[in-house]
Image (tube, helix red, strand yellow):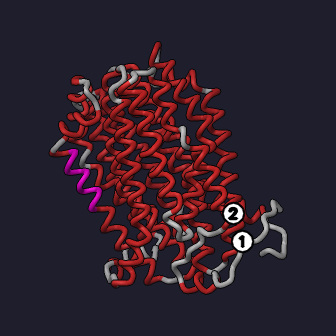
Amino acid sequence: MDARKFDWIDFLKKVAVIAVPVALQNLLTTTGSMVDTMMISSLGKTEVGAVGLCAQFSSLMFSCYWGFVGGGMLFFSQYWGAKDDDGINRSYGLTLACMMTVGLIFGALALFFPETVMRLYTDKEAIREIGVEYLRTVGFAYPLMVYTMAMASLLRSTERVTIPMYGSFLAVGVNIFLNWVLIFGNLGAPKMGVRGAALATVIAQGVSAGVVALLAIRNRHPYLFAVHRHFRWTGDLIRSYFRKCFPILMNEILIGVGNMVINVVLGRQPEEAIAALAVFRTLEGLIIGFFAGFSNAASILVGKEVGAGNIDVAYRRAWRLVYLCQGFIAFVGMMLIVLHTPILNMMGMSGDSFSIAFGMIAIFAVVAVIRMGNWTQNDTFRAAGDASFGTILEIVFMWVMLIPAVWLTGMVWKLPTLLVFACCYMDEPIRYIMMQVHLFRGKWIKPVTPEGQRAMVGWKPPKRKMA
């Protein structure tokens, strides 16, 4: 690979095959969330704020199971590159068991302890009451959501990226239609308000899981339903899996808890700011949705080559993927700023809520280029076997720098909401520089397959060239 010019055309085709379906899937999901927010906003800003805070509880669940997704995709992609069917099956079974445990725990918390959850996130009684009503229904969706994500992770790692996209497409359509029916009481249905939105989410998640499973069966996916092979775990696999997953899991849990602390601070801002934050989180999901396609491409395209022992190919792809992702995110952020007025008006923002929401968008659009560069690098490191470096950096900076800054500005000094919000991103430039140094040193390549381990003997990073 070093001896010839880098084939950009082939590279971009491979990126597009993975990134475009994932980006479209996330765009569909985010579009559904935007429509949800628009519909709920017609009920009032209190309802928007309440559902937005419930979404932060969902994000905490995401943080708790994403460690297993990241660890699972590390094994899936490397075993896929090495053509190790048994390794893929066993690592999927282990990943599925861990993820479903998380989904069931969070579902139980939402169903049986919603008051405790909402009391943690806000001190506004009116918002808490609506949030409790929402959680008591949406909790049934959490295990379905996690199961769908487990299937999607395996399908993407084995380059079947369109199947999850079709599932999302139908689920979003069902969710939007049922929101219209159940929130407002159309077609003779009872007018259920936010509880109707929660019920629509549960049904849509069931549709998504069912469609993904049926399409995988129809396409005769060799791993997804080989249940008799999923749970033949060995001691070596379990030790290796949790050794790789533990740093990722600790990263996601500690980051999730840290974000919860930040959301606790933001949940005690004025009601206009809470409503603006709920809208911003939906729009943030739009940017992250585009980004996730490139992040998945980085994980799969790099991890596959590491597992197959093509170390130079993996290295040269990695840094190109980082810059490609950053360029695309810059474009998306710019478009969001240009179109912010009609978007925020459609989502029910006006007055102070509009101003705060736009301020959040502007701050994020600037830092997103660096933030997503950090995210892509960390996902790349994980896929190649290094689950520790980015994890340690993120945890240390969040708990040493971000949380104290957000707590002091929001809870002690009572500074304006946008200043508190800006403190959430103050570590990104510092981490980016450190991640770049680690990227080009190549020490993040740590294969789990025999093919990759043999190829690493005596390997050194090639000189970097753009062509």
Q: Residue at x 43, y 63 (%)?
A: 247
Type of the residue with mark 1? Pro
Type of the residue with mark 2? Phe
Q: Is residue 150 left or right of residue 360?
A: left
Q: Is residue 167 visible?
A: yes
Indicate the secondary structure of the residue bearing disc 2.
Answer: helix
Residue beneath disc 2: 440
Of 425 and 98, which appears nearest the observer? 425
Q: Is residue 214 visible?
A: no
Sort mark 2 into few (<14), some (14-19) or many (20+) by Cα contacts within 10 Å.
some
Of 301 and 216, which appears nearest the observer? 301
Of 439 and 180, which appears nearest the observer? 439
Give coordinates of residue 93: x percent, y percent. 35, 73
Residue beneath disc 1: 461
Q: Residue at x 34, y 84 (%)?
A: 234
Q: Compared to 169, does 5 lie above or below?
A: below
Q: Point out the image quarter for the C terminus.
A: bottom right
Q: Is residue 64 left or right of residue 6?
A: left
Q: Which residues are magenta?
A: 101-110
Q: Residue furthest left?
A: 112
Q: Assess whether mark 1 and mark 2 are in contact (beta carbons under 8 angstroms).
A: yes
Give coordinates of residue 223: x percent, y percent. 43, 76
Task: Report which quarter residue 368 is drawn in.
Answer: top right
Give coordinates of residue 178: x percent, y percent. 33, 38
Is residue 104 located in the magenta-colored stretch of the structure?
Answer: yes
Q: Compared to 32, does 448 lie above or below?
A: below
Of 112 and 228, which appears nearest the observer? 112
Q: Compared to 269, does 143 lie above or below?
A: below
- Spatial CA distance of label 2 from label 1 is 7 Å
